[in-house]
Amino acid sequence: MSLVSCSHAQQQKTKEFRLPDVPVTLTAPEDRAAYLSLHYWDHFDFADTSLISRPEITEQAFVDFLGILPYTDRAQAAIDTLFRRAATGQEMLYHFIGLSDKYLYEPNSPMHDEELHILVLRALLDNPCLSDTDKIRPRYLLEIAMKNRPGDVAADFTVTCRDGRRRQLSGIKADYVLVYFNDPDCEDCRRVKELLTLSPVVNDLLESGRLKLLSVCVEGKTPAWEKAEFPAGWIDGYDADQRLTREQVYDLKAMPTLYLLDAEKRVILKDASFEQVEERLF
């Protein structure tokens, strides 16, 4: 029994992720990145389900793989290759789907990246090993992700302000419009609200008139919104019909959600952090 245990422990210890050997003839960084991304999983044994419980191998390899993709224009092909090979077994396939959700889709992930997640969703929808039922979720997520992307004109909507006036996003005139979708009951919303309130960059632009800040309570006219106080320079209102969430006009999977728009209401930043907004406006 002890000999078997020792043998098993030795096998576990010697397993490691092996990168492909990039041909020395490829010298341009983009060519090397493309080759590496396309052949990244060449030596990974997708049939070995024990690797699912070895995050220091499989999960770390996946994270490193994601780090290569921004440096190549073959990212879609590389992701297609990963999920085609992972489909050798349902357990391994769903493990990599779960890793994609964890790192690319979850809003609190430091590697959250909607553009890469879109490539994953497309790969899943094109994967013949997934049933039509299994494709319902990725199809839905892709539909939502394709709304209000950077470069698109943001979908218009109307808010009701504290004085009863109704204002449309499209009617707000400024070089930049920062839309702060929130719920005053949300702790993270209060934290981001304070950051925006204290930001010299945001306040300078508000004072100059180059920036307008539209705060939208997505839950409607709630008691928390009625009690809340907002800076005088903000446009503060609520979604009276809760159309934004009911019709999923925007991807609001977490509160708060920040969108930075230009003068034509084209999306500059989607679902951005406060730090990303401040850096872009600086």
Image (spheres, grey):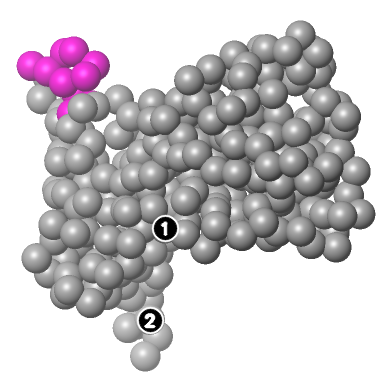
Q: Magenta: predominant secondary structure element? A: helix
Q: Name the mark nearer the viewer: 2 or 1.
A: 1
Front-most of residues 148 and 137: 148
Q: Within 10 Å of the Cα at label 1, are there few (<14), some (14-19), or many (20+) other Cα atoms?
A: some
The residue beneath circle 1 is: 101
Judged left or right of residue 175, residue 231 is right
Above or below, comparing residue 93 to residue 198 in the picture:
below
What amino acid is found at the position of numbered circle 1 in the picture? Asp
Judged left or right of residue 247, residue 258 is right
Q: Within 10 Å of the Cα at label 2, are there few (<14), some (14-19), or many (20+) other Cα atoms?
A: few
Residue 76 visible within the image: yes
First reached walking from the N terminus: tag 2 or tag 1: 2
**Residue stretch rendered in magenta on the structure:** 25-34
Judged left or right of residue 142, residue 122 is left
The span from disc 2 to disc 1 (Cα, nearest Å) is 35 Å
Secondary structure at badge 2 equals: helix
Numbered circle sitting on residue 155: none
Above or below, comparing residue 25 to residue 132 in the picture:
above
Above or below, comparing residue 145 to residue 219 in the picture:
above
Magenta segment includes 261: no
What amino acid is found at the position of numbered circle 2 in the picture? Ser
Numbered circle sitting on residue 5: 2
Give the residue displayed 42% in from the left and 30% down from the top: 153
Give the residue displayed 39% in from the left and 26% down from the top: 151
Residue lying furthest bottom: 1
Residue 93 x %, y %: 25, 67
Judged left or right of residue 213, residue 271 is left
